[in-house]
Image (cartoon, rainbow, N blue to C red):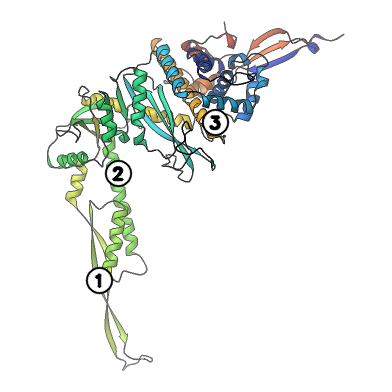
Amino acid sequence: MSLPWQQTSLESLEVGAAPVVARFISRLQLRQLFEQHLPALPGRQPALPSAVTLGVLLSNLLLARQPLYAIPAWAARRAPEHLGLEPGQAALLNDDRLGRALDHLQRADRASLLTALVLRAVREFGIDLSELHQDTTTITFSGDYAGQPSADKAGRPPRITFGYNKDHRPDLKQLLYGITISADGAVPVHCKVYDGNTSDDQVHRDTWDFVRGIVGHTDFLYVADSKLCTRENMGHIASHRGRFLTVMPRTRAEDGWFREHVQAHAVAWREVHREPNPRRRDGPDLVYEGVESPRRSAEGYRVLWYRSSQKSEQDAQSRRQRLDRAYARLEALHSRPRPFKAHREAQQAGQRVVEEEQVGRWLRVEVRGERQEEHKQVGPGRPGPGTEYRRVEHWRFHPVFVEDAEALRREMLCDGLFPLLTNDEAVSVPEALLKYKYQPFVEKRHEQLKSVFGVTPVWLKSVRRVASLLWLYYVVELVQALLEREVRRGMTEQGLASLALYPEGRDCEAPTAELVFAILEGHRRHRLLDEQGEELRRFHDQLPEPARELLCLLGVDTAPYGVS
């Protein structure tokens, strides 16, 4: 007779954060959008629809980020229903099927799909689109990527090629990746991938036109960095009655005029913003003063100037460091074993130091000569009491720096200054500063894309599949932003100052998607099965209390975690 425990088996599958991801994918109706926008495939249909396969791939990008060949094993270890799979469908996954799903997505009208997805997110989550922020980064690739479609071919994917690399890898090829976020939770509402050699100032008109279609009107503020500050970009927005806010670069004539104005006139600065020191609790507050320039830009736009206490310290320190480096190099010139024998040679050496250290505004090069006498024997032979000597004069030259005290004083008056340019006549000087200070949240999205979600290395050779994968990464950023926004809004509504999400139960005041996933990942569901595979009993790992709070804040059903 067989014993009962010899007739049973235990199935343990990971649940993790997949139900949370599935909840947001469901609210975005992503599977339905895929089914509507993916073109029909000719011939025999795949056993696993591309919409389902892409959903599994998206979940993996959010939770694990593995190469295509490793995803089937990853999915086999997880509860299939939370990945959008039916029992037994995980066995149908393989790297070829995942690659073909990416090819299928490449053939779709991804611009229309993106529009439909963003409109759904805006309606479902009530995202405010009155203020939008744009920025770009580069996605760096290893490999040759030869044989790409020619630049003039219609419908081609973006070209992976050399360009200005923001990862400081000019030796590698790249793509330019741009996103636009809302000031309401930093939710991405636009994404586009460009050829790797595209410059940042070429993307703004196309981006603004797209988001105008999403918003439905032009009465929103478009914020971007100094690459927006070209006559063509600003004119395009202003001609359509749009509003923009950007940084004015130092190369503009208006910048030089105001700095000279500050040096020669008293400016009525007033405090417009103050915040605690983010680096030292006992450090001084960061103070911003502002004033509107009495002279507008050449195009007639408002120029708003600010003076930051933190930037003032940084500018003074940077100037001091450059001067110190210049003096150190000058000392090295004085200590060289072979002194300068020509005035011109010493002058050129000193001037080269001034130019390379960029201190020419404050230092002037002068050359000092030193006469040295030497007595040489007249004629050959061993010297003796009657040997005659002649006096020989040698000149040795060395450069010296002369500080221009007045130039340094004038430069100090410009420490901490930076200008913003806008055509919005209603925004005040303090409001414009606060709006621009939201711009680093776009850069944070780029940082999380490259670190938390590991967009590189890209384990794909096909540029078409790369384009599809990066489109899915936009959805990754969208889900991440919506998740964080929902958690933090829920905390505010329930009066929670923090959640114990950090190791050792330490409090977290602003939960991130990474922390939310981390506290849920590893949770498993166990089933005791009889010899026919019928379920006898189901039980789960214990769910931590902070995880229960998170699920409640997100409105995610706790039943998949065995909690009633």
Query: Which image quarter: residue 186?
Result: top left
Residue at x-position 49% and y-position 24%: 514
Q: Secondary structure at mark 1?
A: strand
What residue would you read off at disc 2? 317
Cβ atoms under marks 3 and 1 closer than 8 Å: no
Nearer the observer: mark 3 or 2; the answer is 3
Nearer the N terminus, badge 3 or badge 2? 2
Q: Quadrant of the N terminus?
A: top right
- Side of 122 where 514 appears, left or right: right
Q: Secondary structure at mark 2?
A: helix
Type of residue at label 1?
Answer: Glu
Q: Secondary structure at mark 3?
A: helix
Type of residue at label 3?
Answer: Arg
What residue would you read off at disc 1? 370
Q: Nearer the viewer, residue 109 or 98?
A: 109
Q: Position of residue 26 (x, y in %)?
A: 51, 13
Q: Residues within 10 Å of mark 3 (few under 14, many from 20)?
A: many
Nearer the N terminus, badge 3 or badge 1? 1
What residue would you read off at disc 3? 465
Q: Quadrant of the C terminus?
A: top right
Residue at x-position 57% and y-position 36%: 461
In space, the residues marked 1 and 2 are separated at their CA atoms by 35 Å
